[in-house]
Amino acid sequence: MHSMVEQSRNVILLGTYYSRNGDHLSSLEGIALPRPLLSFSAMLDNIWGSYIAVQEDEDGQIFLFRDPSATLPCYMLRCGDGLTLAGSDVRDLYALSSVHPTLCWPHIARRLRTIQYRDHQTALHEVTELLPGHVTSLSKRQEAVPLWSPWAFVETNQRIFDPVQAAERLRDIALSTVQANGKRFSHALISLSGGLDSSIVSAGLAGADIPCSAVTFLSGTASGDEQRYASAVAEFLGIPLFVRHLDDYPIDITQSDAAHIPSPTGRLFWQSADQIVREVVNETKADCHFHGGGGDNVFCYLQSVAPILDALYVNGAGAKAVSVMGDMGRLTNSDLWEVFGRTWRRRLTGRRHYRWPIDDSLLTNAAAEIGKVDFRHPWLEAPKTALPGSTAHIALLLAIQNYLEGYRHEQLMPVIAPLLSQPLVELCLRIPSWMWAENGVNRAVVRKAFEGRLPQSILSRRSKGTPDGYSMALYERHRPQIRAMLHDGALAREGLIDLVAVDGILAERMPIRGEAYARILSFCDFEAWIQAWA
C-alpha cells in the first residue's frame, strides 16, 4: 500500500488524506489537525482522502475506521483465538498467519447473481471487508457500525436547488479534489477515453500544471474507437496522448487480474488495457495512474422514471414534473406517453427503495438456492421518506465499488479515482436527481460546470464508447477453450452454472446477439480467480 502515516496520541492514519475546511481543500502536509483526534467523527469533519484510521481507546480496544470513498480496501482475516489481522493486501494477511484460504461458495454464488453488489463478506470464508464509512473493533467480534451515511446528504435541508450554484460548486470541488490528489506525484498517467468523466480528471490535472500524460485504447471496432475524442481533449489541454491497440496485447483467459483480491470481478477483457497501462507508465516514468471511474455514478446517470417521481414528491403534480418527464423522455429516446405510463405504474406501487437487479441467466436452481441475497447493506436501507431518485443514486455509489480494484498494475503504483473523493460525492448527493437530466442531457450539471474548460465536442457528446466489440472478438477466438474450461471447472463441479444452456450459447454460429457472451466471459474470470485461490 502506498501511504503516508500520521500518528497522534491515540490515532494512526494509514493512506493519503487532505485537510477539510469548508470548500477549501489542500494537502495535509504542514497543516495541524486537532490532537488528539477525539473521535472518528471528528476525522470526518476535518479530513478527507483514501485512508484507514486505527484508534486505541482507554480500555485497550483497537478500532478501525475506513474512509467513505471506498478507494482504499480494508480486509480482515480471522485467525482464531480472537486474533484478527487487517490490511489492504489479503495475500499479505494470509502470509502473516497460519490460516489457509477457504472458498466461500455461498458468496461466490451470490456474486454470480449480483456481480455489482458488495457487502462485508468476501469469496474467501475467513476474510471480511470493512465497508466504507464504517468502524469496527478488532478486539471484539461485532458488527461494524456506519459513521458516515450518504442518506445524510439527501435530506431536504441539505439540497441545492439553484442550478447555477450547483454547477459552480461542482466545478470548484471537482477541480480541487482532482488537483489535491495529483500534487503529490511527479507525473500522472491518465486513462483518457474522451468521455466526459476522464476528460474532467484530465482538465483538473492539466489546469494545475501537474505533469501528466494520457493513454487511450483502441479496440478495432467502431464502438470502441474513441481516438478522435481523446485527441480533442489532449490537444485542448496540451497533454501528450499515447494511442494503443488492445488487439496487440494478448489475453490469457486462464488468468485473473483479480487474483490478489478476495473476490472475483468478472472483468476478463481488462487484461489488455492493464498491459498497456504498465507499458506506458514505463515509457513516461509516471508514478501513478488516474482514471475517471465512478463518474456516471457520482454524477447520477439515471435512465429510469425515478427523477420524475422525485420532482412529483418535492414539487407536486405541476409544471416541474411535466418538464422533467419531457427531459427523461428525450434522455431515453422514449415517447412522452410511454414515460407517463411507466411513471404512473411506478407511482401506484408506492415503492421508494431501490430494487437491486438479480441475474440468474445460465445459472442453476442450486446457485439461486445457496446464493440467496438479503441486500442488508446500510446504504440500501432507505428511510420511509426517501426519494426514488436518491435511492437509485446511492445504489450507483455502491455498484461502482466492484470496479475500484482487481487490476494487476495496482500492485505496482497508486491507482487514483478522484471523482469518488468524499467532498465531491457529498456535494453531488445534495443535487436533486432531476437536475442531472435537465433538457434531456445526462450528467447535465457537470457539463454546465465545465463549459469553457473542455472542448465543446466533449461537453455535447451523448454517446459512450464500449468494449463490447473487443469482448465479442475475444469470445469468438476462444470458444473451444472456454467450453473446456467451464466443463472442467469448479463452477460446474459445484453445480452453479447450467452447462447445457452454456453449451447452447457456445454452439451458436450466427452473429452474436444479446449479453450471453459477456456472461460466459465473466464465468471464465470466476474460474481463473478460483484456481488462483484453490
Image (cartoon, rainbow, N blue to C red):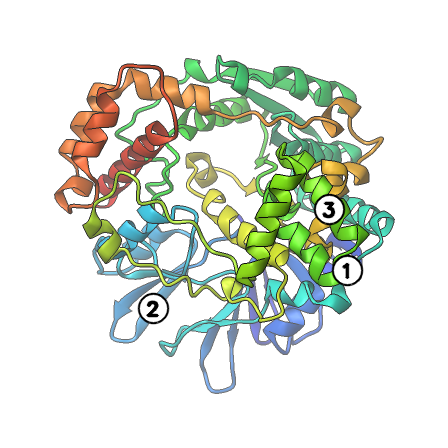
The answer to whether 178 appears left or right of 479 in the picture is right
The residue tagged 1 is 315
Residue 324: mark: 3
Cα–Cα gap, marks 3 and 1: 11 Å
Residue nearer the viewer, 135 or 219: 219
Q: Nearer the viewer, mark 2 or mark 1?
A: 1
Residue 286 lies in quadrant = top right
**Marked residue nearer the N-terminal end (3 or 2):** 2
Cα–Cα gap, marks 3 and 2: 51 Å
Residue 23 lies in quadrant = bottom right
Q: Amino acid at mark 3?
A: Val
**Marked residue nearer the N-terminal end (3 or 1):** 1
Residue nearer the viewer, 339 or 120: 339
Question: Compared with residue 399, is residue 459 higher up or lower down, i.e. above or below?
Answer: above
Cα–Cα gap, marks 2 and 1: 51 Å
Q: Amino acid at mark 2?
A: Thr
Q: Amino acid at mark 1?
A: Asn
CB under 8 Å between callouts 3 and 1?
no
Q: Residue at x 69, y 34 (%)?
A: 330
The residue tagged 2 is 84
